Amino acid sequence: MTKPANKTPPAILREDYLPPDYRIETARLHFDLGESRTIVKSQLAVVCSHDHSEGLRPLVLQGQGLKLLALKVEGRSLREKDYEITDEALTIWPETDHFTLDIETACDPGGNTELSGLYRATGMFLTQCEAEGFRKITYYPDRPDVLARFSTTIAAEREKYPVLLSNGNLVAAGELPDGRHFATWHDPFPKPAYLFAMVAGRLARIEDKFTTMSGREVALHIYVQNHNREKCRHAMDSLKQAMKWDEETYGREYDLDLFMIVATDDFNMGAMENKGLNIFNSKYVLAKSDTATDKDFQNIMGIVAHEYFHNWSGDRVTCRDWFQLSLKEGLTVFRDQQFMEDMTSPGVQRISEVNILRTHQFIEDDGPMAHPVRPDSYMEINNFYTMTVYNKGAELIRMCRTILGPEGFRKGTDLYFLRHDGQAVTTDDFVQALEDATGTDLTQFRRWYCQAGTPEIQVTRSYDALAQTYALTIKQTCLPTPGQPVKEPLHIPIALGLLDKSGADMPLQLVGEERPVAGTRLLQLREAAETFLFIKVPQEPVPSILRGFSAPLKVALNLTDVERRFLMAHDSDAFNRWDAGQQLALKLILSLVRDYQEGRPMALESKFIEAFRQILSKPTADKAFQALILTMPSETYLADALEVIDPEAVHEARKFVRQTLAGTLQETFLTVYRQNQDSGPYRLDQEATGRRSLKNVCLAYLMELADGEGRDICLRQFDQAKNMTDVMAALTSIANHAGREREEALATFYEKWQDDSLVVDKWLALQAASSLPDTLERVKALTGHPAFTLRSPNKVRSLIGAFATNQVRFHNISGAGYAFLADYILALDSLNPQIAARLASSFTTWRRYDARRQSLMQSEFERVLQAPKLSRDVYEIVAKSLNYV
Ligand code: BES
Ligand code: ZN
């Protein structure tokens, strides 16, 4: 097929940025809510912001899917020849440099299935405006660098919509004729339209309060459907902890008298930081121990904190344009990661962050959608809410903090917030503030923002016993990415330690330095290759490189297995202790993959089993950490290490390792499982969650055995457990083993939880993630189940999305999984293109597979491209994957 040039939407380029021609001082909105017809009246105070000595430029207001009912300048209606209207914009030609513009439009919230703009779902009206949804509500300069003060009046039927919310403070409310009522909200902080929000519905309110560091009292309200009112305690506690932490850690105080969270089942994303009125996917608000897992509780805490932290890193200081998205998202992800490191176990938290980065962001950076943290172009901005912008972006902030040190970094962020409060700025402005506050030169560091791709450092070492010196030579490289053939050397902070024979950190002294430094120290690599020479090194050390994963890159260092086991046992850095184990397992499983591919019997060396036994049986204080060390690298991570991905071989080799360990160490697994049973009341502290994760890792191993005790234990846990963590752990294992018990357990579970939508999501997801051969058939059948609907992003993610990340089943060589996914991408494209595009990204790794799978995926892509009307969202992913654009 040839490139369908006519379909290609224009790329938006960063270099084309121009400041806005007009400012909006105030925006007074009036909503008359009707299910199929909502009337929006907008009154804008417009002020020219360009040099108009040569004349006034036209004012362009974005708008989509709107019906224009009235348009007035200074109270006088415009005639049709005075404005121009297209599918995407309304243009007028102002005659004065400031004026009042009145716009009246109608839209159809009931017919809005995209869940962007104003929509109605589960009996509520809701808005979602980031990134470009406000233009579906009214004509407006819908760009983040136009900041206005908003006042919003909402009018609706009182009976159906007793609660009416918008940003800021409630300033008026009252009755209207015909059973209607209204509320008026005023937000004193100027903000871009993407932070606007409005909610109307029948909602229960959970209240609490927080006293800020300057002694102001802030009311905290969480709104949920009435039957969920008992499930908000954890979200509320998380919010209060986040508010306190941000005061202590960043000096950031909340600035309104009211902070609201609304939960909805119908939401494209996780949550949204609208000023004073965050809107959340209910998955990230609602939790009780019998319906939510420990992981869910943790996610809620992290996401509530994330959206709250945006109040400063996003709302008070926002983005100049969408290329700067990482300014707010990278920084806020870093802040929520830090918060979680402080609230839970820092080592465990860091490992989970790195796991996400390595298994998803590295893969994105290596594929057709690879882009820098600050992209240079996009077709559809919604496709750029990526792991790179978010998670790699957070790593860049973390590196800045490592380079500047905690105090320097805090000085830098203080200056950033002070200098740019109320402004829309760039990632460069952020780095500049760090530089100015500390006198550090980050010129070279800025390259991290513009270069895509995962760098690799190659480390070689040499010890000179006579001179007592130790030389580390570090070389950095980065492969080309689309549009970036050549890469410049980056400024890389490398935290490291050198372990002596006892396993202790040696004091480290570089040649030319006065004194040694104890423990971990920082090397700063700036050249393509550099040698760091340590002096007074009395014995050959074992190097522990990139402690805490101090930079987002791959490390090539030829440690021996003995050295890796030594690091596992002794490294003072928790992350590197874990990583040494992962690298050992990786190497081992990859060699088994080759055995499997070449028809040789697989075998596990006894040294590996022995090392594993030691970790398993040694009582450890941090059980969550122990559980992580006992977990083999994921199939995705293993696959990424192969030249050509072989999903089946990866699955079989990993399973072989797990089965062999389970078979050899069955008794030990049983002992540890029993020791960590907890029959007391449910607790969410680290000790209790650690026990559960260790116990459940043991259970999953035991379940690998066809005829062990595992099965009975698992079924008993499934029947008797009172918390969802243990129930899900058991059911997940059960779902991976065919048989009557599996069918019964799945049926019992559904029977019990069918009225709890979030629990039903889990039920769908675990079936879609099963490695059993009938998974696709089952998923297909489940698409017809009454619990499933294409209209709900959560349902789509749970079933179709989970299936698309099921390495072994999705990539089955028949290609049936691919055809299935393509059908759903097409079906969803006209309903909800954002969700369709997310699904399509599962295909973007297609070049990493063998020729047969490549061609199967390619033909599905081409089938998608043939669709008569394809959204820009899906088009961009598919066309870039095929190198058409
Ligand atoms: N601003 C985003 C939400 C968003 C993203 C809205 C894209 C519209 C388009 C929000 O702050 C966010 O980042 N949410 C994340 C969760 C977060 C903890 C990383 C999300 O929704 O996945
Ligand atoms: Zn965010």
Image (cartoon, grey):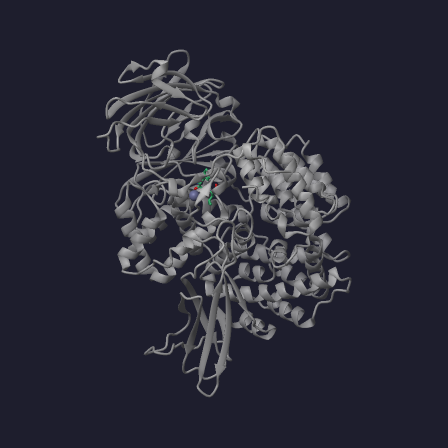
Q: Nearer the viewer, residue 463 or 869?
A: 869
**x and y, in percent, of residue 434 in the image:** 31, 55
819 vs 664: above or below:
above
Please provide percent x and percent y for residue 73.
29, 18
Q: Is residue 715 left or right of residue 369?
A: right
**On the picture, is 825 further left or further right than 495?**
right
Q: In this rendered view, identify the residue nearer to me: 287 or 45.
A: 45
Residue 109: percent from left, percent from top: 48, 23
Please name the residue shown 69% across and 50% down the image: 851
Q: Answer above or below: position of 536 versus 590.
A: below
Q: Residue furthest top?
A: 178
Question: Which corner quadrant holds the C terminus?
Answer: top right
Q: Is residue 152 left or right of residue 720?
A: left
* Residue sitting nearer the eye, 697 or 311: 311
Task: Give the residue at x 54% y 56%.
Answer: 358
Can residue 764 be seen by looking at this rendering? yes
